[in-house]
Amino acid sequence: MLKSFVKNDEADVKMVGAVVGILVTLIIAVLVFYNIAGSIDTSTIDSGLTGTPAANATDDTLDQASTFFTIAPIIAIVIVAVVILGYVSKI
């Protein structure tokens, strides 16, 4: 009974598909985020306020997004390595 699970390649295909889907979603998220963040005009928002809270919030959000988008590809590489090691150890 265990041999039928070991010889089943359906799970491998689904895992590779999931990893590819996550990577494509990450790429789309980066493109959408930076297009939206770049189009925000904080000078007109800040003109009616004391100080520059909108510009500060935008800068903080961009800094945090930059950190996440730097770490996310490393996480994707680790997931791909786990899938490869799992497949190799099964052979």
Image: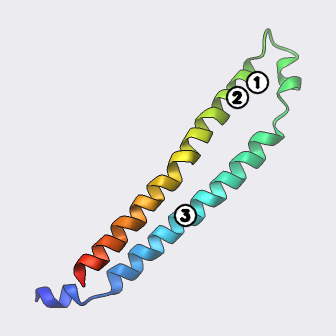
Residue marked by disc 2? 59
Q: What is the secondary structure assignment of the residue under circle 3?
A: helix
> Which numbered tag is attached to residue 55?
1
Residue at point 89%, 25% (across, down)? 44
Instruction: Give the number of the disc on residue 23.
Output: 3
For the residue marked with disc 1, what is the amino acid? Ala
* Residue occupying the far left of the picture: 1
Which label's residue is closer to the chain start, 2 or 3? 3
- Circle 2 packing at 10 Å, graded few (<14), some (14-19), many (20+), is few
Residue 26 position in % (x across, y down): 58, 57
Q: Do the residues labelled 2 and 3 touch (CB within 8 Å)?
A: no
Q: Residues at badges 1 and 2 in contact (C-beta under 8 Å)? A: yes
- CA separation, marks 2 and 3? 26 Å
Give percent across and percent down for residue 10. 34, 85
Left or right relative to 85: residue 78: right
Q: What element carries label 2?
A: helix
Q: What element carries label 1?
A: helix
Q: Indicate left or right for 53 with 3 as reference.
A: right
Going by the numbered disc 3, the residue's amino acid type is: Leu
45 is higher (above) or lower (below) than 87: above
| Figure quadrant of the C terminus | bottom left
Residue 86: numbered disc:
none
